[in-house]
């Protein structure tokens, strides 16, 4: 009886509904129109995407991102990207556990912990919405950054490349007519600067792995020992000895100091540093700090014993967090494809301090801009180089890099002999890669 009553009520309601349709005078045609209208409304529904990234809204990258997001939302009425400025690399996993993870985040190259937690969706699943033209235009060193077994879990967003910035006035005062092209020439130039321009710091260096590994690689070094499946590093080599000894000599002769990026930028802007280590974004900081007091140049990292320069791509990258809808992932992929379109990348490369990440965008940037902003030109050239590689993805490599920073600092400053520092580094790094952790 209860089922019959339910069926009777359903029939009555259906009849009432049909009566209402009949009273409107629409009939079958009206039903089709209503269905069409409902379909259009569904199509027009806005898909919201939460996006976490860490650049302040007051610095060039943050300002550029805000401008670009405004443009995207305006030109894509059915997608809404909502920005939250926060350190997603540190907070996104916690947010996932709390059920509040973003759809898209910019996280650092230390994405191994996200992969280990199965927190990411591969972008490959949605490449149908990412035109091949945009994908193929991306520099290989950028495209393969964050790739694991052919799957793109993190796609580089703000490529950071190590380079040297120099005070043209100081080099001219020292009688140096051209910036150094090799590590040998760099050593010769800083010795000349120390002698002819007293009171000036010839060279300031950042003692971090991203600025240690490139000269090591240019001298023939390798990140991992061949055949060990990334379970052993390869620091007990002539390349490592040469690289560590090179910087140790500069430091011992008081031709180089170690410093952090902000301190280097401030002292460089004050005219206290002749040549400063940094990145393309750091170039803009140094340029702004100089306030036009002297001309500023930028060059590639010097060539090593291999006859070429070498570099690593670092920086933040786009990831898709799990537990969201297919429509959100598809919308996020449209945003990603838009981000890598030529005009957007050209804007990013001329306003953020970071280089454009595609060949097509680089071609869209005027020659006059690149001439006036050599830091961007140098980084773009480095991204295109076959000797520029991505930083390793495994979580353990973060610990390897920490051990590298310590060993390099100890060897260069004389706290330990070079060979002893390298033996300690090799032992610690191999332990980390085999599963032991210091964190």
Image (cartoon, grey):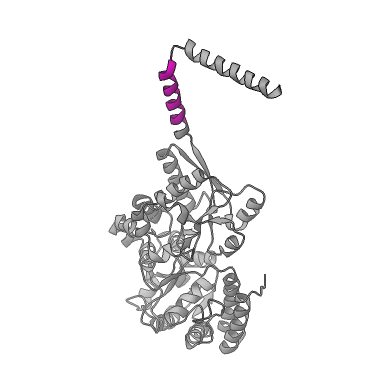
Q: Residue at x 45, y 30 (%)?
A: 39
In this rendered view, identify the residue nearer to me: 204 or 74: 74
In which quadrant is the N terminus drawn?
Answer: top right
Residue range (magenta): 26-41
In this rendered view, identify the residue nearer to me: 67 or 403: 403
Q: Is residue 66 visible?
A: no
Quadrant position of residue 17: top right
Is residue 262 left or right of 37 when viewed as pictured?
right
Is residue 422 left or right of 164 when viewed as pictured?
right
- In the image, residue 153 lies in the stretch drawn in magenta: no
Q: Residue at x 36, y 61 (%)?
A: 373
Q: Is residue 103 above or below residue 398?
A: above
In which quadrant is the C terminus drawn?
Answer: bottom right
- In the image, residue 28 lies in the stretch drawn in magenta: yes
State the residue lying farthest toward the right: 1
Is residue 162 left or right of 407 when viewed as pictured?
left
Q: Residue at x 59, y 81 (%)?
A: 425
Q: Is residue 364 above or below residue 70?
A: below
Residue 403 in picture, x, y percent from top left? 60, 76
């Amino acid at each position: 009886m209860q089922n019959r009553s339910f069926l009777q009520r359903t029939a009555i309601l259906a009849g009432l509904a049909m009566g209402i349709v009949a009273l409107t005078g629409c009939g079958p045609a009206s039903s089709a129109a209503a269905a069409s209208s409902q379909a259009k409304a569904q199509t027009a529904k806005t898909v919201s995407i939460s996006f976490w990234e860490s650049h302040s809204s007051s610095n060039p990258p943050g300002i550029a991102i805000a401008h670009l997001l405004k443009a995207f939302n305006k030109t894509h009425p059915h997608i809404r990207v909502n920005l939250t400025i926060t350190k997603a690399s540190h907070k996104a996993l916690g947010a996932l556990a709390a059920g509040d993870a973003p759809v898209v985040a910019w996280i650092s190259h230390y994405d191994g912990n996200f992969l280990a937690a199965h927190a990411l969706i591969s972008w490959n699943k949605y490449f149908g919405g990412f035109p091949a033209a945009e994908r193929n235009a991306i520099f290989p060193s950028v495209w393969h950054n964050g790739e694991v077994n052919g799957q793109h879990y993190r796609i580089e967003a703000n490529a950071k490349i190590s380079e040297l910035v120099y005070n043209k006035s100081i080099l001219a005062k020292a009688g140096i007519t051209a910036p150094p092209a090799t590590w040998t020439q760099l050593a010769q130039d800083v010795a000349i600067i120390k002698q002819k321009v007293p009171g000036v710091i010839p060279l300031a260096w950042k003692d971090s792995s991203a600025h240690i590994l490139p000269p090591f690689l240019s001298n023939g070094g390798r990140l991992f020992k061949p055949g060990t499946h990334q379970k052993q590093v390869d620091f007990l080599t002539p390349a490592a000895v040469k690289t560590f000894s090179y910087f140790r000599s500069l430091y011992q002769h008081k031709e180089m100091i170690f410093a952090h990026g902000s301190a280097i930028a401030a002292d460089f802007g004050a005219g206290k540093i002749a040549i400063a280590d940094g990145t393309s974004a750091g170039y803009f900081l140094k340029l702004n700090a100089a306030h036009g007091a002297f001309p500023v140049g930028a060059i590639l990292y010097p060539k090593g014993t291999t006859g070429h320069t070498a570099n690593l791509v670092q920086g933040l990258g786009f990831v898709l967090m799990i537990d969201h809808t297919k429509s959100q992932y598809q919308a996020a992929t449209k945003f990603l494809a838009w981000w890598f379109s030529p005009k957007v990348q050209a804007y990013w490369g001329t306003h953020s301090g970071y280089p454009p990440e595609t060949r097509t965008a680089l071609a869209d940037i005027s020659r006059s801009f690149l001439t006036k902003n050599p830091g961007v030109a140098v980084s773009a050239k480095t991204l295109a180089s076959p000797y520029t590689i991505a930083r390793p993805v495994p979580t353990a490599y973060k610990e390897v890099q920490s051990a590298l920073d310590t060993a390099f600092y100890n060897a260069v400053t004389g706290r330990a002999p070079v060979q002893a520092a390298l033996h300690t580094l090799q032992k610690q790094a191999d332990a980390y890669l085999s599963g032991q952790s210091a964190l």
